[in-house]
Amino acid sequence: MNKSVRILFLVIALGMASLVSYVVYQKTSRQSTVLQPESDQEIVQIAVVDRNLNRGAKITQQDLRMTSYLRKTLPNGHFTDLTHAVDRIVIKPIQATEPLLESALAPPDLTKGGMAAVITPQKRAMAVKVDDVIGVAGFLHPGHLVDVLVSLQKPGEKRTQVTKTVLENILVLSVGTQAQETEDKTSKKVTVVTLEVDLEEAEKLALAINQGRIQIALRGYSDTDQILTKGITVKSLLKSYATASNAPVKVSKVKAITPKPPIVKQQLVVEVMNGNNVKSLTMDGN
């Protein structure tokens, strides 16, 4: 085989290899295009929160900034135009760098912020003045869930107090302080807790405040079960963890024995007359 024939075979082999490489490349590039469409890789600018926003806050231009997101990772209800989000009212806390979503904002026709903007429909906001102990020692914050207990005089029974849980799973809207004048004309700061209740719960809470002393119990976010209680009185409280020595002593009935009357001996008196002399003799009659 001469040299020219060898060169021809080499050229043909290189051409076939190039053709196979080109076909394989085309197929793989088409598959990658199908798996990752160009639209999914598109970058979109959406609005994110630049600082922490609390419930009731009114959004300003300075509260927002634009950032890049892949189109396929965009959350529902995002904003691509800052002007559509400015002056909207926040109804749930938003942390800095979080995307601003429609679900976190009040309806567009609600233009005033504050407490009225964050109250759930058919609910009411009711403020309760408490001290530091009742307010769970400063650990109570908006968004927490609490139970409300009341201690008052038991109806129809004098000097008998009862403590009862009257409200459960109540949302805390706000926690603040208020200056209150004391009897000695000095100023004292008290904690004011605003709770979200319906009308029936508001009636219970108002009566509890007027008739007794209330206590707030903090509960976990995931603990939403309702627990029914009978309430506790002083008598039942003192029976808690009682030892056996505190148990009432059983007294057995003893049959009374009636004593027999004493036997009285009968005596006979006999008078003996001897002329003018009379003599009396005493004799037993038994």
Image (cartoon, rainbow, N blue to C red):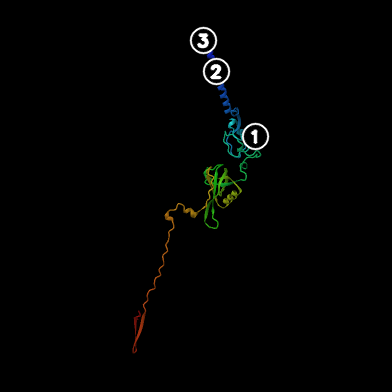
Residue 214 or 117: which is nearer the viewer?
117
Q: Quadrant of residue 246?
A: bottom left
Q: CA distance from mark 3 to mark 2?
A: 20 Å
Query: Is residue 38 positioned above or below 15 on the image?
Result: below
Q: Indicate which label's residue lies in the foreground, 2 or 1.
A: 2
Few, some or many residues within 10 Å of mark 3 (<14, 14–19, 20+): few
Q: Indicate which label's residue lies in the foreground, 1 or 3.
A: 3
Amino acid type indicated by mark 1: His
Q: CA distance from mark 2 to mark 1?
A: 60 Å
First in sequence: mark 1 vs mark 3: 3
- What residue is drawn where x is 56% and y is 21%? 23
Query: Label 1's element?
Result: helix
First in sequence: mark 2 vs mark 1: 2
Give the image location of residue 54, x and y in percent.
58, 38
What residue would you read off at disc 3?
3
Residue 8 or 206: which is nearer the viewer?
8
Amino acid type indicated by mark 3: Lys
- What residue is drawn where x is 57% and y is 24%? 27
Query: Is residue 262 positioned above or below 47 on the image?
Result: below
Amino acid type indicated by mark 2: Met
Please say whether residue 200 is visible from this viewpoint: yes
Give the image location of residue 286, x and y in percent.
35, 79
Few, some or many residues within 10 Å of mark 2 (<14, 14–19, 20+): few
Q: Which numbered marker is on residue 84?
A: 1
Query: Is residue 72 positioned above or below 154 on the image?
Result: above
Residue 272 or 278: which is nearer the viewer?
272
Residue 219 or 32: which is nearer the viewer?
32
Q: CA distance from mark 1 to mark 3?
A: 78 Å
Residue occupying the far front of the picture? 1
- What residue is drawn where x is 51% and y is 10%? 3
- What residue is drawn where x is 42% and y is 54%? 244
